Amino acid sequence: MKKLLIWSVPLALAAGMSGLLRADDAPPAITPQELQDRWQGTDTYLWGVEHAAAIAKDPESAGVLAVIEAHDFLKDKEPQVQIDFFNKALYEAKSRPVQRQIRLVLYRLFRDTNQNDKALEQLEDLMTDQ
């Protein structure tokens, strides 16, 4: 009889404890959309890392990216401040792809400020660039 009690008491306690667990204690199931969103986020992050590494290896790509970032950084400044910055950068830039990107930015700035002659000059320089 004692042996029966020795085995039955832990089993009864375990059964009682498992009865205390509620169904909502389990983590919520992940829906297929949530799983896809998590995968997409990871995939986007890895894509960004790969492209950042590729850009870091190529000085011209890094320079073009720097022009794009500078344009984004200066977007809240007065147009003439932006034009002055990029005119100076154009003079100092040695890389042809970087110069072309600067000319595109200058074209847009001149166009947006109704300086159509200067905008057209930038386009002409881009078209005749060898």
Image: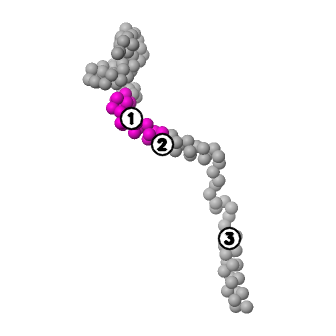
Furthest-bottom residue in this view: 1
CB within 8 Å, label 1 to label 2: no
**Residue drawn at (58%, 43%) of the image:** 37
**Which quarter of the rendered picture does the N terminus lie within?**
bottom right
One can see residue 48 in this view: yes
Where is mark 3, residue-wise?
Answer: 18
- Look at the image and say whether residue 59 sits in the magenta stretch: yes
Q: Which quadrant of the structure image shows residue 62?
A: top left
x, y percentage for residue 15? 70, 74
Characterize the magenta stretch by its predominant secondary structure: helix
Which of disc 3 and disc 2 is earlier in sequence? 3
Secondary structure at numbered mark 2: helix
Identify which residue, 36 or 55, lies in the foreground.
55
Residue type at numbered disc 2: Leu
Mark 2 sits on what residue? Answer: 46
Residue at numbered disc 1? 55
Q: Position of residue 6 (x, y in %)?
A: 67, 86
Of labels 2 and 3, the one closer to you: 2
Instruction: Report the mark closest to the observer, 3 or 1.
Output: 1
Amino acid identity at mark 1: Ile
Rounded to the nearest whole Å, what is the CA distance between mark 2 and mark 3?
A: 42 Å
Q: Is residue 11 above or below residue 76?
A: below
The amino acid on which the numbered mark 3 sits, given as a three-letter code, is Ser
Disc 1 packing (10 Å; few <14; some 14–19; many ≥20): some
Q: Which of disc 1 and disc 3 is earlier in sequence?
A: 3
Q: How is the image coloured?
A: one colour
- Between discs 1 and 2, the one toward the N terminus: 2
Secondary element type, mark 3: helix
